[in-house]
Image: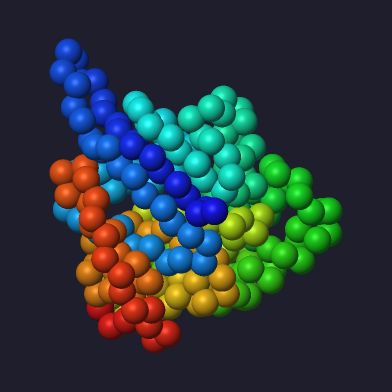
Amino acid sequence: MPIIHLQHVSKGYTLGKVNQPVLHDISLKIFAGEFVAIVGPSGNGKSTLLNILTGIDRPCSGQVSVCGSALQHLKEEQLSVWRGANVGIVFQFFQLLPSLTLLQNILLPMDLVGKLPKKARLQRAHALLALVGLAGQAQQLPSQVSGGQQQRAAIARALANDPPLIVADEPTGNLDSDTADSVFALFLHLSQQGKTLVMVTHNEVLAQSASRRIAIEAGRIHTDHQTVSSEPPVA
């Protein structure tokens, strides 16, 4: 069974009295362990597709099955619980809570889900910071570290509850090219560890290193397969 299965999904928004279609009859399967890059011009539905995959938004029609759950049938409270256990989300602008240290930002989703005992949560948070190269910055606030370090902390937070699916919306779009390369190398490492990753990116060089590339144009998709690279790309 695919970890993501979309069947005839359409989405539009009402602006005044006008319905603006965004996604058109999308059917898509993504399997466990794939690293999928979603590319295409701005305003063509990429972020809307990610929002539907994560249950942040709902389709106007069609079926959305992710990690074994039919999202269109879940209520908001159920979606929140489902999301905490199954999906890690990485945003372009990090979305770390500014009043919490990096360590506390990673602990927060574990505290909300309650999957691990408190002592194990702390151990896991430190291990995740070490994984992303931030072992020495655990007690610093987001404002006290660089943009690249904030994004790596955001990736660690996305991994907090060990979700089967990691979704990233332009995770390198706010970074310089060298920092973007190091962040993307971390995504490649996670992919090689068996995580399923779906990433929206405008960077075609980075997209070519994913195992599959999906292009969205005018709310419709077409796919082509790419070879996975074990080396970080040069942007």
Residue at 64% across, 68% down: 128
Q: How is the image coloured?
A: rainbow
Q: Nearer the viewer, residue 152 or 207?
A: 207
In the rendered structure, the answer to whether residue 177 lies left or right of residue 118 reads: left
Residue at 50% across, 54% down: 2
Residue 184 spot, x, y in % from top left:
40, 73
Q: Nearer the viewer, residue 158 or 9?
A: 9
Residue at 68% across, 63% down: 125
Q: Is residue 173 visible?
A: no
Above or below — where is 94 with respect to 156? Answer: above
Above or below — where is 202 with respect to 109? Answer: below
Residue 235 spot, x, y in % from top left:
25, 78
Residue at 52% across, 45% down: 66
Q: Nearer the viewer, residue 125 or 194?
A: 194
Residue 47 spot, x, y in % from top left:
32, 46
Q: Is residue 197 visible?
A: yes
In the rendered structure, the answer to whether residue 101 lies left or right of residue 92 reads: right
Residue furthest to the bottom? 231
In the rendered structure, the answer to whether residue 171 lies left or right of residue 67 reads: left
